[in-house]
Amino acid sequence: MKKESDRALRHLLIDGGAHAKFNDVIPAVPAKLRGQKPARMPHSPWMLLEHMRIAQWDILEFCRNSKYESPKWPDDYWPTTEAPPNPAAWNESLKTFRKDLKSLENLIASPKTDLFAKIPWGDGQTTLREALLVADHNAYHLGQLVDVLRLLGAWSKA
């Protein structure tokens, strides 16, 4: 891949293009609604945030740790409670999500990372495939979070 197109691909993976941005959606979640599920919706904001954090961490660890073993699907990918167990849990989840996202962005941005090379301990996955998986997964659940916030009356953006 040519240097310019390689740089453009890395930027797109990090920027996210037209998708909702995590840092635009998360501030719209009032503390009092973090554990609330709208009628007939399966997830609260807390459940979506924690699921995104866990799944992103899983993919990041797979990309960088040959001895990593993924959690049990689906049980270990979702929190066991609808609300954060304590007030600090929400902030800790945000902090960890952002830290892991930055680590993934650094991996993608590094010219040492061959986005197309197979991950040696995988079964055909590449860093590009895993980065696209994180981007797609995060965008999907951010969209769900916006829907949850709309139904809870907490989304005011057009």
Image (tube, rainbow, N blue to C red):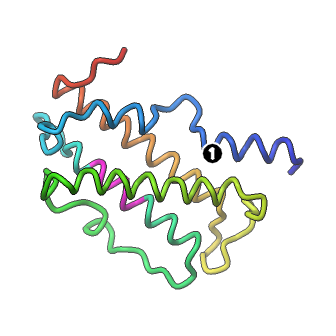
Q: Secondary structure at mark 1?
A: helix
Viewer-side residue, 147 vs 103? 103
Which residue appears at 18% of the width and 42% of the height? 34
Which residue appears at 21% of the width and 25% of the height? 154
Could you tell whether 119 is left or right of 3 in the image? left
Going by the numbered disc 1, the residue's amino acid type is Leu
Q: Is residue 90 above or below residue 37?
A: below
Could you tell whether 111 is left or right of 3 in the image? left
Which residue appears at 53% of the width and 54% of the height? 102
Question: How many neighbours does mark 1 have within 10 angstroms: few (below 14), some (14-19), or many (20 or more)?
Answer: some
x and y percentages locating residue 121 in the rendered image? 61, 80
Q: Which residue is mark 1?
A: 13
x and y percentages locating residue 129 in the rendered image? 62, 57
Which quarter of the rendering shows the C terminus? top left
x and y percentages locating residue 115 in the rendered image? 72, 59
> In the image, which residues are magenta?
48-55
Residue 124 lies in the magenta stretch: no
